[in-house]
Amino acid sequence: MVSVGRREFITLLGGAAAGWPLAARAQQPMMPVVGILNPNTPDVFTRNMGTFLAGLKDAGYVEGQNVAVEYRWAEGRNERLPALAADLVRRQVKVIVPGGGPAALAAKAATTTIPIVFQAGLDPVRIGLVSNLNRPGGNITGVTNVSTTLAAKRIELLHKLTPNARTIGVLIDPTAGPGAEIQAADLQEAAAALGLQLMFLNTSTEEQIDAAFATLKRERIGALLLPDFTFFNARREQLVTLARFNAIPTMYTFREFAASGGLISYASSISDAYRRTGIYVGRILKGEKPGDLPVEQPIKFELVINLKSAKALGIEISASLLSLADEVIE
């Protein structure tokens, strides 16, 4: 009998494994791949990505262990979304996760078979993503912030802070597809109910943002409202800085704006929405059909007030309004 030492045995075993048929090695299951389609840049998405991965983990999937995640960033340019969506389809990912209405519409146009789980700040029925919230059907479901339904509340809060402003400026991203018209209409209706006028300014580039603030300053517009556009999320620092420099009280959407020095923000919780999106992706990876999962609506809202910014603008926040705030930044 030939004696084989431990080292020699390991060497022989390694050589044998290398010689195993390709088919035998291919039996090892490959990790499913989730494709993220986002109109922003990675740095803007960091916090939300964390909550999305937490939701995915709650559903039993951990990135790098039993699921892989691929990212496609439009870097603030909505026109790039269709090509990025098509790239994920060619990659044959198991699920596409678009962030925002334009990304969701691009994903829908790119595939009718790969499951899509969107996170969008608009009513998905109104923008044509699904025909029914309870039974979306097809290959699409997701979580909506329905931010436009909050239009009346945002204008009401801004009016309380700036009662002498009879005209409110509104920045609109015209490249956002049907979402631009829907948000403009909702805001117009809310303003009319309070006897206020709106001045809409199209802003889809950094230069147009600068020009818009110059117009607001020249026309002496006393307040500004930023609707829910993903382009604005990528330009948060620019928008907050210009509002502060020009001393224009501004209502923002998400808390990140107030945390960056903005006066006030009010919206459903974007981080909670992404956590629930991650849970839905996990359920679909386990075999559930997206068309059978109802589109989830917001359950958590955040009113954030920055007292330091209010003081710089000479605005006194009433005790009653402070008591409604979920977070007060001092």
Image (cartoon, grey):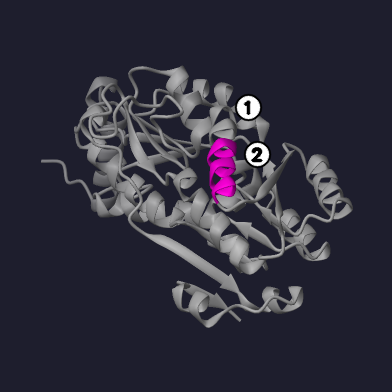
Q: Which residue is mark 2?
A: 75
Classify mark 1: helix, strand or loop.
helix
- Residue 96, percent from left and from top: 40, 32
105 over 300 or under it: above or below: above
Residue type indicated by callout 1: Arg
- Residue 140, percent from left and from top: 33, 28
Residue type indicated by callout 2: Glu
Tag count: 2
Any part of residue 53 in sight: no
Label ID, residue 80: 1
Instruction: Tell me which corner region of the image, top left, top right, bottom left or bottom right, holds residue 136.
Output: top left
Q: Locate residue 163 relative to residue 61 in the image: left or right.
A: right
Classify mark 2: helix, strand or loop.
loop
Image quadrant where one finds the C terminus? bottom right
- Residue 204, percent from left and from top: 72, 36
Q: Locate residue 105 relative to residue 165 in the image: left or right.
A: left
